Image (cartoon, grey):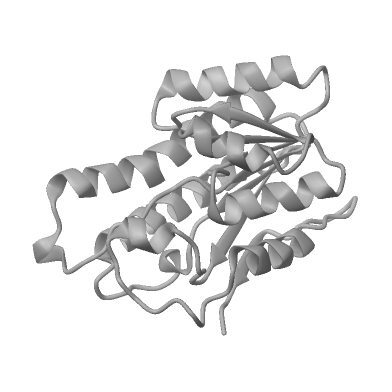
């Protein structure tokens, strides 16, 4: 069984549909129940679960509900795609939007990973954390977004050290620009016609996530162009 967060649109939705088409039971999570329900219409293998990952109780309830709905099926993969963007020169950025950015990217990742580690650290769970190439290099006009993604990267690399020797593994994913609804909602206007689609990125990521009995891919960069 697979759990995908941020699955109401973009990469999360594309991944969910691909796994469902291959017969996997996929639990899809997001904050917008209506949009999740729309994604879930694509397959009877898709099961929507609305949740606010910025809320400690919301994360716990999501995983409790997941365990109840699974019918005893083991959770073997979690793909964390949830997040948001906010861009612009630092002198023009608003404090409330910066706070929202940190909540949606950093706090949500910390609370979800913390709860997953508490429950699954001794099981063979693959936790895939989707960030951005903004976690690998600085970008003008994206200072706070880079700060959020670098924070998530530092967090998961530290948790990896805590999980050393345990069956639970963390895979870090750094996708480049995708042509999705992410950009209009971020407030940044740019031409995305040369960007990869969410389906293209999902196809590449799904292929790269193949593991063997004695190894797994730890870090994946999906470059555009």
Residue 11: x percent and y percent? 59, 56
Q: Is residue 46 above or below residue 211?
A: above
Total count of labels: 0
Quarter of the figure with the N terminus: top right
Relative depth, front residue between 139 and 164? 139
- The quarter of the picture where residue 5 lies is top right
> In percent of the image, x 42 and y 58: which residue is there?
182
The residue shown at (67%, 22%) is 66
Query: What residue is rendered at 44% in x and 50% in y?
Result: 152
Tell me if 40 is positioned left or right of 113 in this view: right
Q: Is residue 85 left or right of residue 35?
A: left
Residue sitting nearer the eye, 133 or 169? 133
Q: In the displayed image of the protein, which residue is found farthest to the right?
A: 213
The image quadrant that residue 106 belongs to is top left
The quadrant of the image that shows the C terminus is bottom right
x, y percent for residue 33? 51, 30
Residue 34 placement (x, y as % from top left): 51, 33
Going by the image, does 54 lie left or right of 170? Answer: left
138 vs 169: above or below: below
User: Could you tell whether 71 is left or right of 198 in the image?
Assistant: right
Residue ID at (60%, 31%) = 117
Q: Furthest-left residue in view?
A: 91
């Amino acid at each position: 069984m697979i759990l995908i967060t941020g699955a109401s649109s973009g990469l999360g939705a594309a991944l969910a549909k691909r796994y469902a088409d291959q017969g996997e039971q996929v639990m899809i999570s997001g904050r917008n129940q209506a949009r999740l329900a729309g994604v879930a219409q694509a397959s009877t293998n898709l099961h929507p679960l609305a949740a606010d990952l910025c809320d400690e109780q919301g994360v716990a309830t999501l995983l409790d509900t997941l365990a109840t709905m699974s019918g005893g099926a083991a959770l073997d993969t979690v793909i964390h795609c949830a997040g948001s963007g906010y861009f612009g020169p630092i002198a023009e950025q608003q404090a409330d939007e910066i706070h929202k950015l940190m909540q949606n990217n950093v706090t949500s990742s910390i609370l979800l990973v913390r709860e997953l580690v508490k429950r699954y650290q001794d099981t063979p769970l693959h936790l895939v954390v989707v960030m951005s190439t903004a976690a690998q290099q600085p970008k003008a006009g994206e200072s706070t977004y880079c700060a959020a993604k670098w924070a998530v990267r530092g967090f998961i690399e530290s948790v990896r050290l805590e999980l050393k020797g345990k069956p639970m593994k963390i895979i870090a994913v750094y996708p480049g620009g995708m042509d999705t609804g992410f950009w209009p909602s971020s407030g940044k206007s740019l031409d995305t016609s040369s960007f990869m689609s969410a389906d293209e990125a999902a196809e590449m990521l799904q292929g790269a996530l193949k593991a063997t009995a004695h190894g797994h891919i730890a870090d994946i960069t999906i470059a555009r162009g």
